[in-house]
Amino acid sequence: MKVLILISVVAMATVGNALYSCPQFWNLFEGNCYRYQGDRLTWSAAEARCNRYFNSAGMGHLASIHSLAENRFVYEMFKSSVSINDIPNWVHNPVDPNPIYGIWIGLHQTVADGPWKNSDDTDQDNFFRWRSLEPNNSYYVGEQAEDCVHIWHFNDDSDIQQKWNDMYCNEVMSFVCKMPADGQMRR
């Protein structure tokens, strides 16, 4: 009887996963489709690029991140897609051991010092993975407030961090798009 129940549970899980589908070149994770984009764009240009993708379940946006597992998944997409030749020379600058390098995610502020929102309008569910002392809304000379968020990649090869940093939105970075998988309500 226990074997029959186990077989039934495995069969239901397999059938459930078969209901999800993503377009070619997209990766399925927890009912959503993800795609790494290596082009280095501003936050708004990256969001506009993601908006070009859609399926019957919805439109693409910069990835909204709701769990540690999802944060790791998105970061690993970035890490596994970047070769040493893709990394700009300034990343290896010995003067700055932690240059700005990483990927845009969908979290941003529509009003300076306002609440953090996802570009896909999903609730953030109180999950934040801020780097120490972030968000700090530092201002750069000639730049606006830091109203956009990226997952930081440290130059010291420390993959364990995978933390978030608020950044001015005109910086250019690669990014990950996310859209609901066909056959699933989005989260």
Image (cartoon, helix red, strand yellow):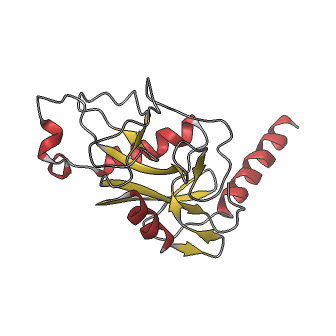
Name the outermost residue toward the right. 1
**Residue 84 percent across, percent down from the top left:** 17, 45
**Residue 25 percent across, percent down from the top left:** 42, 66
Name the outermost residue toward the top. 132
In front here: 74 or 13? 74
- Side of 49 where 116 appears, left or right: right
User: Could you tell me which residue is drawn at 35 percent across and 39 percent down?
Assistant: 139
- Side of 22 where 50 appears, left or right: left
- 66 above or below 95? below
| Quadrant of res 167 | top left
| Quadrant of res 164 | top left
In front here: 48 or 2? 48
In front here: 36 or 149? 149
- 3 above or below 142? above
Q: Quadrant of the C terminus?
A: bottom right
**Residue 141 percent across, percent down from the top left:** 26, 43
In front here: 81 or 1? 81
**Residue 160 percent across, percent down from the top left:** 39, 27
User: Could you tell me which residue is drawn at 55 percent across and 74 percent down?
Assistant: 54
Question: How many marks overall?
Answer: 0
- Side of 10 where 37 appears, left or right: left
Q: Quadrant of the N terminus?
A: top right
